[in-house]
Amino acid sequence: MSTDAFVPHPDRLLPVDPAVRDIARELYGRMAEQPIVSPHGHVDPRLLLDDTPFTDPTSLFITPDHYVTRLLHARGVSLADLGVGRGPLSEAEARHAWGLLAEHWRAYAGTPSRLWMEHEFHEVFGIEKVLSPATADELYDHIAERLARPEFRPRALFEQFRIEVLATTDDPCDDLAPHRALAADPGFAGQVVPTFRPDRYLEPARPDFAQLADALGEAAGIDTAGYAGFTEAMRVRRLFFREHGGVSTDHSHADAGTARLAEEEAARLFAQARAGRIAPADAVALRRHLLADQARMAADDGLVMTLHPAVHRNHHAETFARYGADVGADIPTSVTFVDGLAPVLNDVGLEKDFRLVLFTIDETVFSREIAPLAGFYPSVYAGAPWWFIDAPDAILRYRRAVSETIGYSRTSGFIDDTRAFCSIPARHDMSRRLDANHLATLVAEHRVRLEDAAALVETLPAQHPREVFKLGGTR
């Protein structure tokens, strides 16, 4: 057999011990073919609306995936050579970028990115060779040839991947035209739902805060010159998203702090922010108040609130200036939730329609804060390992960290959080294998009955995230 030959092992990510692995195989087998429910991600809905064929392997696997580009960048590869921040690549440019990935392929050994891409290569494109400088052109041509076929267009892959629900991430002022068109299209049976992402509208220190408030007011048809109008415009736009299928809001700030200011003080600080003369400490106080406002609105309109704070965005200023956001230059920081969320949870934490899903990249927070919060408040759920820790070892640590406190029922279900469309099934498959691994270990240690583990895996992949994110029953 050629040293280039490779097929992903059927028992990947399952326990090494043969007796435990047999249990895990049975549990994984119950999950493997279940549909995918993806309640948080960043795929552009126009991909499915237009159903335009993918142009080349680079634009599919490399350019949109900051997991891939950031490691290449760390090894000295220019983001420009990978197509980041640029328009469509020429054939020569796309092939060159693919060659760079092949040249550095061994650097991905042991990473989830390689695990996902090898899954995609084999399961989606039928490749049974290792990517390398020697095979780069062959694999590129193989993938490119298939991308030209009808069965590899976005909608066909959506069905092939068994995606039932795909959530996008959208600006509060977005008209959601692609979502409306998809919902009205009799030729598309999937459920693509928008997610309300108001982060930048809640940051009073931004130099464009007044312009953003004006844009929000225009979208809502409300005068946002004052705090009361701004708050009402937020409420109106949230309802617009809900009316067009939205089920959740997404929030990410420097910390998890919330606060309640007196209405008069909030109005005073809002006026200062609009005038561009708010003090830094006051901007933080107002931002925390505005986030607490979002929680109150969530208790009223029922949209699930997801919070993933504490990331230093765009850490390298020149990279941000040249390529923009979301290119891999975001770095995690430490975070605390208990004190920061006390104002919100004392305000609406026991409200029947309020739901808050907490994500972190600071792993010790899972067992120290998030699981205990989710173990008391009916509204709080522990979000899945996300971003830098949506990786095998971290996912197993998460399950071990939270299961003793809250089991599985108080967790969110898997979140793929991806812009790379073809990685969606690979990421969900990884999660299912790791849940089988963890539950099989508990069964083997006689901590969980096999019957209970089997019942859990029947609902974990699809039914559970539907319930947490209020997506209704299986379609």
Image (tube, rainbow, N blue to C red):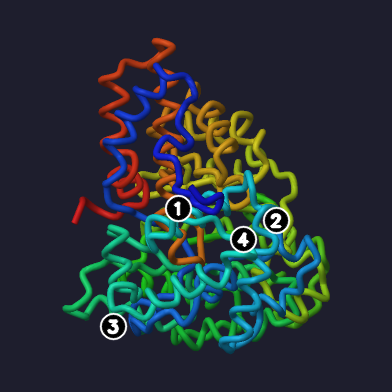
Above or below, comparing residue 366 to residue 388 in the picture = above
Which residue is tagged 1?
A: 119
Q: Residue at x 54, y 41 (%)?
A: 346
The answer to whether residue 327 of the structure is visible from this angle is yes
The amino acid type, in three-letter code, at marker 3 is Ala
Disc 3: CA contacts within 10 A as few (<14), some (14-19) or many (>=20): some
Q: Circle 3 sits on which residue?
A: 181
Q: Secondary structure at mark 4?
A: loop
Which of discs 4 and 2 lies nearer the camera? The answer is 4
Q: Earlier in the sequence, mark 3 or mark 4?
A: 4
Packing grade of label 1 (10 A; few <14, some 14-19, many >=20) is: many
Depth check: give the residue in front, 286 or 21: 21
Tag nearer the camera, 3 or 1: 1
Q: Which residue is labeled 2 in the image?
A: 311
Q: Are marks 3 and 1 in contact (CB under 8 Å)?
A: no
Q: CA distance from mark 3 to mark 4?
A: 42 Å
**Amino acid type of the residue tagged 1 in the rendering:** His
Q: Which label was assigned to residue 132?
A: 4
Neighbour class for label 4 at 10 Å: few (<14), some, many (≥20)? Answer: some
Image location (x, y in percent) of residue 87: 59, 88
Q: CA distance from mark 2 to mark 1?
A: 29 Å
Residue 342 location, quadrant: top right
The kind of residue on which mark 4 rests is Ser
Q: Which callout, 3 or 4, points to the residue nearer the camera?
A: 4
Asked if the residue at tag 4 contacts the one at tag 3, i.e. Cβ–Cβ closer than 8 Å, the answer is: no
Marked residue nearer the N-terminal end (2 or 1)? 1
Q: CA distance from mark 4 to mark 2?
A: 34 Å
